[in-house]
Every structure is written in C-alpha cells, then in structure tokens.
Amino acid sequence: MATTTNHRQRQTTNKVDESSSAIDNLLHCPVCSNEFNAPKLLPCLHSFCFECLESSLAQSQIGPGQAFLCPLCKTQCVVPPRGVRAMKSNVFLVTLQEFFHNKTLDSDQVLSFFIMKFV
C-alpha cells in the first residue's frame, strides 16, 4: 500500500512540475519571450504583448482595418479601426500574472488542487 501511495505522490509531483512549467510558459509572450506586458487577445485566442504586436504590425506596414496573420496559427485577423490599442486585453492573463506576483496562495497548492480536481 505504501508503494502505491508513494507512486501516486510522485505522479502528482510530476504533474505539478509540468503544470508549473506550462503556466510559466503561458505567462510569457511568444514574440519577445518576456512576461506579458499589456497582453492583447487575437480572435484566434492567441495573446501577444501590446508593444510586440504593435511593432510587428508597424514593421509589416499593417495598419487599422488591414488583415494580418497570427504569428502562431496563421489565422487571419484584422486590426481594429482604432488600432492595436482597441484590441481586447487578455484579462485572464493579467489576472493570472497578478495572482502569481501577489502569491495569495502557494502556487503549488493551487496547482495540486486543480490537478487533483480536473486531471
């Protein structure tokens, strides 16, 4: 019985480590690899830093009302008439960042809870 319990604890620890890494990756922009700064959400649900998206579009000479492809999935998106600033902010990522910076709960505790509940 102790072997089974130890095995389950190792599995849970491995899942927590994998989830911590996945969440860490989730909090970083795929363009600059830094933690998101003012993340903007594309219609395909990928997110990029406001500045990364704005500078990338400016380099490609893509402005308001023009189409561009998501750098990750190549879904066609359109810059809103008021520009990148008018794109929806990814409030989920902002909230997740705040949570991990404030550490209201130990992140391992939260991850363990979600893994046990949903995995």
Image (cartoon, rainbow, N blue to C red):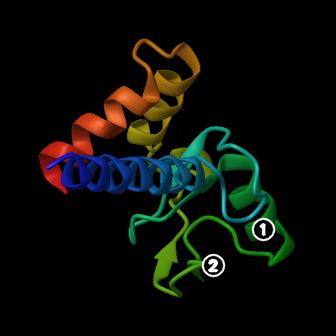
Determine the residue positioned at 81% across, 60% down: 55
Q: Position of residue 36 (x, y in %)?
A: 65, 44
Disc 1 packing (10 Å; few <14; some 14–19; many ≥20): some
Tell whether label 2 touches label 1 (CB within 8 Å): yes
Q: Measured along the vertical axis of the image, is residue 39 above or below residue 52?
A: above
Q: Give the Cα distance between marks 1 and 2.
A: 10 Å
Determine the residue positioned at 30% across, 38% down: 112
Determine the residue positioned at 43% across, 12% down: 104
Q: Which residue is mark 2?
A: 71
Q: Measured along the vertical axis of the image, is residue 113 above or below residue 62?
A: above
Q: Measured along the vertical axis of the image, is residue 25 above or below residue 110?
A: below
The amino acid on which the numbered mark 2 sits, given as a three-letter code, is Pro
Q: Position of residue 46 (x, y in %)?
A: 48, 65
Of callouts 1 and 2, the N-terminal one: 1
- Name the residue nearer the viewer: 70 or 94: 94
Q: Secondary structure at mark 1?
A: helix
Q: Position of residue 110 (x, y in %)?
A: 33, 30
- Name the residue nearer the viewer: 13 or 115: 13
Q: Measured along the vertical axis of the image, is residue 55 above or below residue 1?
A: below
Q: Which residue is mark 1?
A: 56
Q: Quadrant of residue 117?
A: top left
Q: Secondary structure at mark 2?
A: loop
The amino acid on which the numbered mark 1 sits, given as a three-letter code, is Ser
Determine the residue positioned at 25% across, 47% down: 115
Q: Quadrant of residue 7?
A: bottom left
